Image: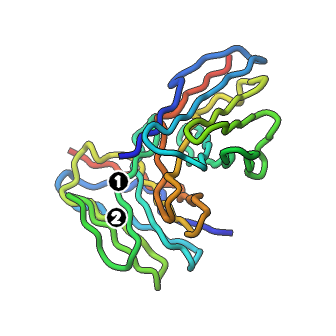
């Protein structure tokens, strides 16, 4: 069974710090990886996608992928209180199956 | 970006009644849509995969006769909660894929269902 593991947190960081969120996955054949942000009472929104090993940067967000270690992470620089949310890691096995396997999410709190 | 519209955003119904939730892809054709349920402070739970023109695929433990899914067109999937009970009260969220390999899912805004 395909699994995606995240530390449930809560992860608490001060405003302006770097928040580091981690995720491991079990299916070595996974090909695409996503980070979603979910505010309390709202639906998930896509913030980052990554498909190849290495880093991908988008504004204050950097996704890192290491397929050999089956590990994907999300760094949030200059964390803001508005970044406080649950971050979901999602993995797609590829091919014509569009189903994503989600982790349980990490709750991030950024303290002013 | 892709937009998925979900309606209604909030519904309150009496026990025993049925509720229909609509999920539309507004700017792309979605051959596959997914329905999730989320209880407070818990993770997303996939209920079923909705395939255009064919029967939905339900996850283990989800009653297909209670949660009816219809995907009649490439832009619309509906979830009907039949004979709703208070324990069905939850946050229901649909998502859709553009259908391109390795593409992400785009989520609707969710429907908060309260059964009294």
Label 1, secondary structure: give it. Answer: strand
Give the mark nearest the N terminus, 1 or 2. 1
Quadrant of res A9 = bottom left
Task: Tell me residue A49's x, y (percent).
Answer: 38, 62
- Per the image, the residue denoted by label 1 is A47
Q: Residue at x 74, y 48 (%)?
A: B58
Q: Residue at x 25, y 44 (%)?
A: A81
Indicate whether A29 appears above or below A60: below
* Quadrant into which the C terminus of chain B falls: top right
Task: Tell me residue B38's x, y (percent).
Answer: 58, 40
Label 2, secondary structure: give it. Answer: strand
Q: From this viewpoint, which residue is outermost toward the right?
A: B65
**Is B68 or B47 nearer to us in this picture?**
B68
Mark 2 closeness class: few <14, some 14–19, many ≥20 residues within 10 Å: many
- Per the image, the residue denoted by label 2 is A74
Quadrant of res B35 = top right
* Pointer 2 chain: A
Tell me whether circle 1 and circle 2 mark residues in contact (CB < 8 Å).
yes
């Amino acid at each position: 069974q395909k699994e995606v593991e995240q530390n449930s947190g809560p992860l608490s960081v001060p405003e302006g710090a770097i928040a580091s969120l981690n995720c491991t996955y079990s299916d070595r054949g996974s090909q695409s990886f996503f980070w979603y942000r979910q505010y309390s009472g709202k639906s998930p929104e896509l913030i980052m996608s990554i498909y190849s090993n290495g880093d991908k940067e988008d504004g204050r967000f950097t996704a890192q992928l290491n397929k050999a270690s089956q590990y994907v992470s999300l760094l949030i620089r200059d964390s803001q209180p508005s970044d406080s949310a649950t971050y979901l890691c999602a993995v797609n096995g590829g091919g014509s199956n569009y189903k994503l396997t989600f982790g349980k999410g990490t709750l991030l709190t950024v303290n002013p | 970006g892709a937009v998925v519209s979900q309606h209604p955003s909030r519904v309150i119904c009496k026990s025993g009644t049925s509720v229909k939730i609509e999920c539309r892809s507004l700017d792309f054709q979605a051959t596959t849509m997914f329905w999730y349920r989320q209880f407070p402070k818990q993770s997303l739970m996939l209920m079923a995969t909705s395939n255009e023109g064919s029967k939905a695929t339900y996850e283990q433990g989800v009653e297909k006769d209670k949660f009816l899914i219809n995907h009649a067109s490439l832009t619309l999937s509906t979830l009907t909660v039949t004979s709703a009970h208070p324990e069905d009260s939850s946050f229901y969220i649909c998502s859709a894929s553009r259908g391109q390999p390795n593409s992400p899912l785009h989520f609707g805004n969710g429907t908060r269902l309260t059964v009294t």
